[in-house]
Image: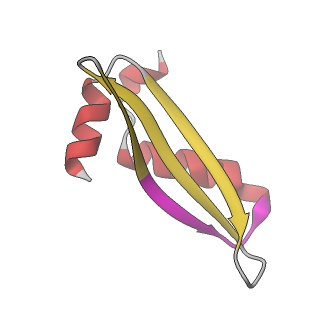
Amino acid sequence: MNNIIKEIRQSNFLSLSVDSSLDMSYNEQICLCARYIVGNELKEKFLVLIYCEDASIIGEQIFKQFKEYCIDKELYN
């Protein structure tokens, strides 16, 4: 994971992919992936699977995980 975070932080281009599904107990699971460019190569990497009991805070949990794993403040500007 550290190598992926390092590559993402060095990349000038970044895309976040989020997909959700329900497990057998009807609980929300969110898959968070990053797509970025290193040199001339496009990479797509799985970051985390988020288990979410409360669907009303899905957005908050996504951004919390993304900040924790990947984001530098420079990417917000």
| The stretch drawn in magenta includes residue 39 | no
Q: Which colour scheme is used?
A: secondary structure
- Residue 60 shown left or right of residue 68 in the figure: right
- Residue 23 relative to residue 13: left or right: right
Q: Which is more toward the observer, 9 or 45? A: 45
Q: Residue 16 in the image: x percent, y percent?
A: 53, 36
Residue toward you, 66 or 34: 34
x and y percentages locating residue 59 in the rendered image: 68, 48
Drawn side of residue 51 relative to residue 70, left or right: right
Which of the 4 image quadrants contains residue 75?
top left
At 37% from the left and 20% from the top, the residue drawn is 74
Q: In this view, does 39 lie above or below 73?
A: above
> What range is drawn magenta here?
47-55
- Residue lying furthest front: 41
Q: What's the magenta bit mostly, secondary-structure-wise?
A: strand
Seen at 69% across and 55% down, the residue is 58
Total numbered labels placed on residues in the image: 0
Indicate whether 36 appears above or below 33.
above
* Residue 10 image position (x, y, % from top left): 25, 25
Which residue sits at x=73%, y=75%? Answer: 27
Residue occupying image coordinates x 72% and y 57% = 57
Q: x, y percentage for residue 66?
A: 47, 45
Tell whether position 51 is magenta: yes
Q: Camera-side residue: 19 or 56?
A: 19
* Left or right, 41 with reference to 58: left
